[in-house]
Image (cartoon, rainbow, N blue to C red):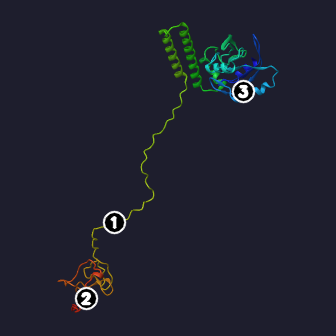
Amino acid sequence: MKLIEEHCFSETEVEVGGFLVGLVGEDETLVSNVFPAQHSVGASTQLTFTHESWNALYDQLKNEPEGTTLVGWYHSHPNFGVFLSEHDKFIQSNFFKQDGNVTIVVDPIKGRKGWFYSKKGKIEKYKHETDTDRPRLGVSSTDSAANIGAKLGGGGVSIKTVIAISAVMSLLSFVLGWTTTSLTSGGGGASQSSVSDLTARVAKIEAYLQQNAIAAPQVATKPKAQVGPKASQKPTAKSPSKPSTKKATPPAKSSKAVKGTECKSGQTDAKYSCTLSLDTNKFTWTDPKPKTLESSKPSSSPTNSSTPTSASSSAKPSSTPTPSPSNS
């Protein structure tokens, strides 16, 4: 028992356990050695032996005295009390079902331990549970909620987990006891007082959870800014504009026109006219009334339009030249 308690008191977050080896007699079972389970999978409410656990056990049995065999197993119930869960009963009924096979349950938080054994296909409780030889880790041997501090110190689990497990186990113990009483009494349904008691216990558990649970910190989040089109820092290239259909306005009159020098189509002057020369195919400043070439359709007045006339659209000169003005 010293080795069993030492192992069970070493961990309070999950269940731990191992195997009992020894001899089974007619009226008693002798446990001669204890092997903590290797490669087992422990959870907060159950313990599972893997194939590797069984293989390691059989290797250890080879070093035991002749006739020593597997006679049972043990496991912890940290802060849950001494009882066999459905999972525990499954292990006992399938792997330790021979008469005299033993299972030991130790609660290190409440400081309690108890024995169960198989007999004629059933699981029996051996006498009554007792206090452990080691001092309990909690402050109470019956109240799971009062042992929260010890649970935290031993296993390092969160307070939310401890409160939730303790509350569930308290409610589960009540429901199991209430169900057993109802079945054994032969009643077809629950009494009103039992239902009221159950409702009151659930309300107390909910209030306790709300009072002691640590709320997760709320992280303030900033509202996301509206995402709009970003202003470009670089000037974007403008698409080529369509040619304007409006007529170009005539440039302002120039007072620096010199006769015979080049000018641009459409330019005007008070003294000279900007006229296209057929010889040079350029616009030059000339007298206001220059001699114009006759077109295929003679015009009644000299041409003084400021709109340039392309060389290709000019009329061919007449075979008979027109006399030039005296000032030509």
- Percent x, y of residue 259: 30, 85
Name the residue tied to disc 1: 242
Residue sitting nearer the eye, 152 or 21:
21
Disc 2 residue crowd, few under 14, some 14–19, many 20+, Cα 10 Å = few
The answer to whether marks 3 and 1 mark residues whose Cβ atoms lie closer than 8 Å is no
Q: Return the residue found at the far front.
A: 120
Image location of residue 241, percent across then percent down: 35, 65
Kindly identify the residue that appears in the image at 54 percent across and 12 percent down.
179
Residue at horizontal 49 percent and vertical 15 percent from the top:
199
Q: Report the residue marked by disc 3.
A: 54
Hey, which residue is sitting farthest left in the picture?
Answer: 300
- Residues packed near mark 1 inside 10 Å, few (<14), some (14 to 19) or many (20 plus): few
Apparent side of residue 244 relative to residue 200 in the rendered image (left or right): left
Cα separation, mark 3 vs mark 1, equals 90 Å
Q: Of callouts 3 and 1, which one flags the residue occurring earlier in the amino acid sequence?
A: 3
- In the drawing, does residue 294 fall left or right of residue 195? left
Q: Which residue, given by chain and number where applicable, does mark 2 sit on?
A: 317
Taking the spot 23% from the left edge, 78% from the top edge, the residue there is 305
- Describe residue 9's horizontal placement relative to residue 219 as left or right: right
Q: Earlier in the sequence, mark 1 or mark 2?
A: 1
Task: State the separation of the CA atoms marked 3 and 2.
Answer: 124 Å
**Vertical comparison of 218 with 78: above or below:** below
Residue 16 left/right relative to 311: right
Q: Amino acid at mark 2?
A: Pro
Which of 105 and 159 lies nearest the eye of the viewer?
Answer: 105
Tell me which corner region of the image, top left, top right, bottom left or bottom right, holds residue 153: top right
Q: Residue 109 is drawn in which quadrant?
A: top right
**What is the secondary structure assignment of the residue under circle 1?**
loop
